[in-house]
Image: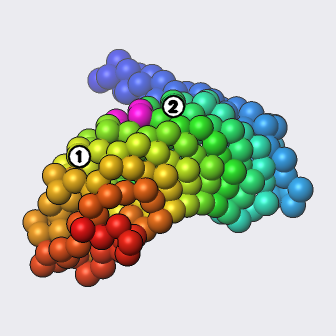
Amino acid sequence: MAPQFAAAGFLTGLLALATFASCNTEGDILYKQRLAWEDPNNVLQSWNSTLANPCTWFHVTCNNNNFVIRVDLGNAGISGPLLPDLAEIQNLQYIELYGNGLNGSIPETLGNLTNLISLDLWDNLLTGEIPTTLGSVSTLRYLRLYQNNLTGPIPSSFGNLTSLLESKLQENSLSGAIPASLGNIKALQFSRLNDNMLTGTVPSKSFPLSTFGNLTELNTDRNNLDGTRTSSGLRVTAIIQDALKTA
């Protein structure tokens, strides 16, 4: 019996050590991100490298196993880049960094966050293309990247985001056609693409959701689209589009 208790104790010790090591790693990543940001309001003062467990820091939330699951820094006055290292916080579910002065590109590595539910980066100064890798995050429900300076196409890989409820990409400089693959997102409720530089048409294959899905708002206003569809179907309560380009 004694060897069994000893083995159980040994395994418990290993688990505790692994959890502690993970906390150290996540704390190191967040502290590195702190150093990359300007923080004039000192909202990150508690992100102290001498405190090994980031679960004690303000604006950080952990689960019962002391793994970081949320970073909440909306309207915090911070500025600077997003580090690719954030993707190493594997249990991260919520990235709430809206209303700041974040610049540079969205790291492609964020597509490795397989537990991510909400990516809120709206109202920043982000540039470059939207990473196609985000289409790999099957858990994603809220994608809000609006009011940035993003360019390039809407990734066709977004058609894989079958749990997505809100896609808000408006007020950027996105270009190219609307991917037909978006029609795969049966859960989608809000799709806002207005105030971009999108071309082509709103393909019926992209939004059969107006009749068969859960879409309640589709906004394609102020783009360079032709032949924008006008039928609202049975479920869509608002289709907002360029009046002069209505077919």
Q: Residue at x 59, y 38 (%)?
A: 128
Range of magenta residues? 132-136
Q: CA distance from mark 2 to mark 1?
A: 23 Å
Image coordinates of residue 76 in percent, x first then y, are 75, 62
Image quadrant in which the C terminus is located:
bottom left
Between label 2 and label 1, give the one nearer the viewer.
1
Residue 133 counted in the magenta span: yes
Depth check: give the residue in front, 43 or 209. 209
Q: Residue at x 32, y 39 (%)?
A: 156
Q: Secondary structure at mark 2?
A: helix
Name the image quarter holding residue 189: bottom left
Up-down: is 129 above or below 21? below
Image coordinates of residue 66 in percent, x first then y, are 54, 45
Image quadrant in which the N terminus is located:
top left
Residue that badge 1 annotates: 180
Residue 174 counted in the magenta span: no
Q: Residue at x 10, y 66 (%)?
A: 212
- Give the left or right position of residue 39, taking residue 201 as reference: right
